[in-house]
Each structure stands twice: as structure tokens, then as C-alpha cells.
Amino acid sequence: MPRPRCLWCMEPPYEDVAVLKWRGEERERLTVPLCRKHFARLKEAGPEGREQKGWRYKVGWW
Ligand SMILES: [Zn+2]
């Protein structure tokens, strides 16, 4: 079985985080594993979120 890892890097997950992933009118509500670093960066990004491969992500489902 593959080792669990962060959505955006090879680090082990620190926490499963409820995130909103959006692009234009498209919305997805997901729970994703993030490492400590990426969780901190996403929190710092605030409501504007953080872009990753054409999608924006932010903490929380609304
Ligand atoms: Zn990471």
C-alpha cells in the first residue's frame, strides 16, 4: 500500500483538511491530507486561497 502523503508534496500528512477547490463556477468540497507546511500556507492564504495547477484552494467548505 502506498504511504499516505500530502496532496502537494511527498511529506507525510499532518492533518486531513476540509478544503474548497474552485475554478470559475465549479466548486468541489474535499477533505485532503496536507503536510504541516502546506496546511500552514493554505491557512495563510486566507479567503483568496492558493492556486495549484489551475485550481484555487482554501480552508473550509464555503
Ligand atoms: Zn506538503
Image (cartoon, rainbow, N blue to C red):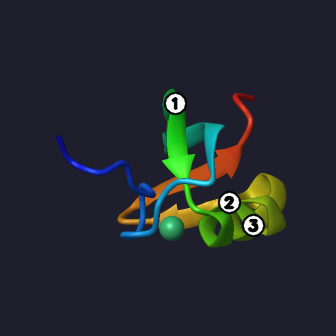
The CA span between labels 1 and 3 is 17 Å
The CA span between labels 2 and 1 is 14 Å
Q: Secondary structure at mark 1?
A: strand
Q: Residue 30: x percent and y percent?
A: 51, 30
The CA span between labels 3 and 2 is 4 Å
Q: Which disc number belongs to residue 40?
A: 3
Q: Secondary structure at mark 2?
A: helix
The residue that appears at 80% across and 53% down in the rendered structure is 47
Q: Residue 42: x percent and y percent?
A: 69, 62
Q: Amino acid at mark 2?
A: Phe
Q: Amino acid at mark 3?
A: Ala
Ligand 1 near label 2 (Cβ, under 8 Å)? yes
Disc 3 to disc 2: CB gap under 8 Å: yes
Disc 2 to disc 1: CB gap under 8 Å: no
Which residue in the protein does label 1 denote?
30
Disc 1 to disc 3: CB gap under 8 Å: no
Q: Residue 2: x percent and y percent?
A: 21, 47
Which residue in the protein does label 2 denote?
39
